[in-house]
Amino acid sequence: MRSGDSSGATAEPSHRDIASCNCRFIGVHVKKIVVTIEVEDLPKWEKHFKTHGELYRQQTIQGKYEYTMLEDNNRVVLCAEVSDIDAFFQVLKSESAGDAVKFDGVKPESVQFFVLDKQFVF
């Protein structure tokens, strides 16, 4: 059940919820995306995260994900250059992305996306 349901019960968001709540960014021309997540276990997440290269290529991520792990609260901040933001979010809706989220121990309700669409050059 979703929050707001008359029963009062809530369910964890699925990987499809993660992708659909960010669809407002589809069509925006951007170069970088920042993702923040909370994971169950940092070493497990990092080990499994590194096995999804083909999925990241399908998301049009340009060769690397940069990230840092915050050990005090099991949070991860990731940044990547994306050549096709529509493809990025479309792949995120896939079953393989959902499987990766579960396999890696990502808490779906914690996922946030930030599309960097502005620059300051000095």
Image (tube, rainbow, N blue to C red):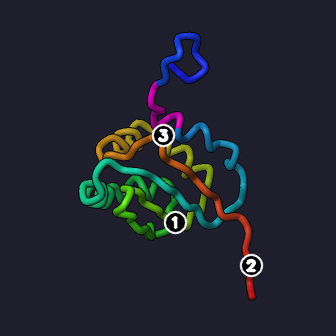
Q: Which residue is mark 3?
A: 109
Q: Amino acid at mark 2?
A: Phe
Q: Quadrant of residue 47?
A: bottom left
Quick one: 81 or 70, which is closer to the camera? Answer: 70
Query: Residue 84 placed where, x, y %?
Result: 60, 57
- Of the numbered discs 3 and 1, the one sitting upstream in the chain is 1
Is residue 59 magenta-colored?
Answer: no
Badge 1 marks a residue whose secondary structure is: strand
Mark 3 vs mark 1: in front: 3
Query: Residue 22 placed where, x, y %?
Result: 62, 44
Distance, label 2 to label 1, CA atoms, is 18 Å
Q: Are marks 2 and 1 in contact (CB under 8 Å)?
A: no
Q: Amino acid at mark 3?
A: Glu
Badge 2 marks a residue whose secondary structure is: loop
- Of the numbered discs 2 and 1, the one sitting upstream in the chain is 1
Classify 10 Å Cα crowding around label 1: few (below 14), some (14-19), many (20 and above): some
Q: Which residue is mark 2?
A: 120
Distance, label 3 to label 1, CA atoms, is 21 Å
Q: Which residue is pictured at 43% across the width and 57% down the height?
A: 56
Q: Which residue is mark 1?
A: 80
